[in-house]
């Protein structure tokens, strides 16, 4: 039995987790990070407060327009703005909505007039100060205001929104690739000297990586309240999840005082139950915010708690089961694999086939493995008939792959409600669109009808998951 490699990654990196349990081999290619990838078309879908007057609606010919928000969906209400857009988003706090005409984005007002011409290749959501990150065809980013004027010329590798109480935006310089922070006039308030950086917290602090490789904390003036001394650092509520040495993890405050300090190889973020998975001396367990091992490190693998239960695999038994917050078995380890419970109380699981022989030399991911969903009692709510299954999301849908190799979405009854010729589908975003890969591995967004309406081009995270390593545009 073996578990590799370490799950510790930097923001935006990908890793592959290979787990072998006796005859079981499973490969997971995961991409982790903080926020959307710079090249992602998902950036358009970032949440922003909508105005309730009009809402985007798809017309009979597949184009989008706007109807009154108080018209019941499907009522065939009259068009306030006739459908003529390839994509449409809700109106935001600036009274504007981003729409797509052919291959470019522009912004319209509530009369349907283009206030910002459709010349933009990618956009982010509006910042509270009325600025929005935008990218032209050349691939460089800047900020424009609601009148369409470039406040920050498009000459940066990437920009993040102005967010929180500190009027500074994280940005990446094109030539050096280093990060700094811009003010609202486009000047560098904090010079781009950091190989990595995170956004400012509500307390006005940002974790950044110094040129020599260690992480520290800066304030809005670029001063170091906490000098670089950490191997890893990221916000965790009002504190920071920190790694000071290869096997020393914990929570620190802005002055670098340890609020929690444990010996561990990895410490994950704390969940709603104030327990965090941690790896120590070859096993996974769970610690509380006082640094106590509530559940001692004893498992080959452990996933986060959800619904009061966590899926774990014992070291001496190549099977997954579920424990409660006391470490007691609620569902005995009888599954070949299992994930945390989804929003609807169902969890992805793979059954153990009857009289299955152990085959230590068998290649990972057997072709005849079947994925299904179990309930909180461990009973099959959806029979294991899928080649692959993702967890259920808050919208009540889960992406699955059929035995024929086609992807779609099922509901909690196991009924295929969205189906198409996709090589992969991913979860729906708040505006009701989900990324998908078509048969040519082109990335598109589909709506809840399964219609591909928003082609977006290259997205590194999806490309990595699809198995490609070279960008295509």
Image: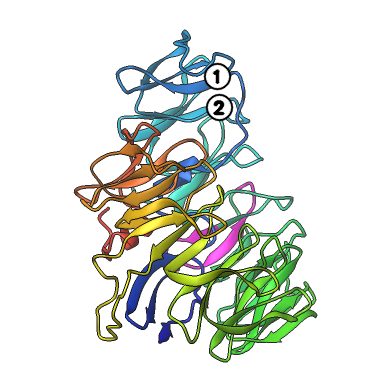
Q: Residue furthest bottom?
A: 281
Judge by depth and name the residue closer to the eye, 250 or 85: 250
Residue at 37% x, 39% y: name it.
Answer: 415
Instruction: Work out whether 59 lies above or below 317.
Output: above
Instruction: Give the percent coordinates (x, y) of residue 111.
Output: 51, 14
Residue at 61% x, 84% y: name it.
Answer: 297
Instruction: Give the percent coordinates (x, y) of residue 258.
Output: 78, 81
Instruction: Work out whether 359 lies above or below 164.
Output: below
Give whichever of discs 1 and 2 has the lower sequence position: 1
Judge by depth and name the residue closer to the eye, 246 or 379: 379
Instruction: Give the percent coordinates (x, y) of residue 361.
Output: 25, 86
Whether label 1 touches label 2, CB < 8 Å: yes
Judge by depth and name the residue closer to the eye, 356 or 202: 356
Q: Residue furthest front?
A: 355
Can see residue 32?
no
Q: Which residues are magenta?
A: 171-185
Determine the secondary structure under disc 2: loop
For mark 1, what is the residue? 54
Left-right relation of 350 to 316 = left
Q: Which mark is residue 371?
A: none
Looking at the figure, which quarter contains the N terminus?
bottom left
Q: Residue furthest top?
A: 78
Can see residue 391?
yes
Instruction: Work out whether 455 lies above or below 190.
Output: above
Residue at 47% x, 12% y: name it.
Answer: 75
Decide whether residue 176 is among the magenta residues: yes
Determine the secondary structure under disc 1: strand
Q: State how far apart marks 1 and 2 are (Cα).
A: 7 Å
In this figure, what is the number of numbered marks? 2
For mark 2, what is the residue? 91
């Amino acid at each position: 039995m073996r578990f590799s490699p370490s799950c510790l990654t930097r923001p935006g990196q990908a890793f592959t987790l290979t787990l072998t349990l006796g005859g079981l081999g499973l490969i997971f290619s995961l991409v982790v990070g903080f926020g959307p990838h710079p090249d992602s078309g998902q950036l358009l879908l970032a949440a922003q407060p909508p105005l309730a007057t009009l809402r985007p609606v798809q017309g009979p010919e597949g184009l989008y327009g706007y109807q009154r928000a108080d018209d019941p969906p499907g009522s065939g209400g009259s068009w306030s703005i006739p459908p003529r857009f390839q994509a449409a988003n809700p109106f935001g706090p600036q009274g504007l909505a981003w729409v797509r005409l052919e291959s470019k984005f522009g912004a319209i007002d509530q009369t349907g007039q283009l206030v910002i011409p459709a010349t933009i290749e990618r956009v982010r959501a509006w910042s509270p100060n009325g600025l929005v990150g935008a990218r032209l065809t050349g691939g460089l980013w800047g900020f424009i205001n609601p009148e369409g004027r470039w406040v920050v010329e498009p000459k940066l590798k990437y920009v993040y929104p102005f967010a929180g109480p500190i009027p500074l935006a994280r940005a990446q310089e094109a030539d050096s690739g280093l990060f700094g922070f811009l003010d609202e006039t486009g000047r560098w308030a904090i010079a781009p000297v950091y190989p990595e950086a995170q956004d400012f917290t509500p307390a006005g602090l940002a974790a950044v990586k110094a040129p020599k490789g260690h992480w520290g904390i800066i304030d809005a003036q670029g001063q170091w309240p906490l000098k670089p001394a950490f191997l890893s650092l990221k916000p965790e509520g009002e504190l920071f999840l920190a790694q000071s040495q290869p096997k020393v993890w914990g929570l620190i405050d802005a002055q670098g005082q340890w609020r929690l300090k444990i010996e561990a190889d990895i410490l994950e973020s704390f969940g709603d139950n104030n327990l965090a998975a941690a790896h120590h001396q070859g096993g996974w367990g769970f610690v509380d915010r006082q640094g106590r091992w509530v559940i001692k490190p004893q498992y080959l693998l452990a996933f986060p708690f959800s619904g009061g239960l966590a899926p774990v695999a014992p070291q001496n038994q190549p099977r997954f089961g579920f424990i409660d917050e006391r470490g007691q078995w609620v569902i005995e380890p009888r599954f070949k694999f299992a994930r945390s419970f989804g929003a609807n109380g169902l969890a992805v699981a793979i059954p153990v086939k009857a009289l299955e022989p152990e085959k230590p030399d068998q290649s990972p991911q057997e072709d005849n493995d079947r994925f299904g969903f179990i309930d909180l009692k461990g009973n099959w709510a959806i029979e294991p008939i899928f080649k692959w299954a993702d967890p259920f999301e808050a919208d009540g849908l889960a992406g699955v792959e059929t035995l024929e190799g086609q992807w779609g979405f099922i509901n909690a009854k196991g009924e295929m409600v969205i189906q198409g010729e996709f090589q992969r589908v991913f979860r729906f975003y708040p505006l009701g669109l989900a990324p998908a890969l078509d048969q040519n591995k082109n990335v598109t967004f589909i709506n809840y009808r399964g219609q591909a309406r928003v082609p977006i081009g290259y997205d590194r995270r999806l490309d990595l998951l699809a198995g490609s390593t070279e960008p295509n545009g």
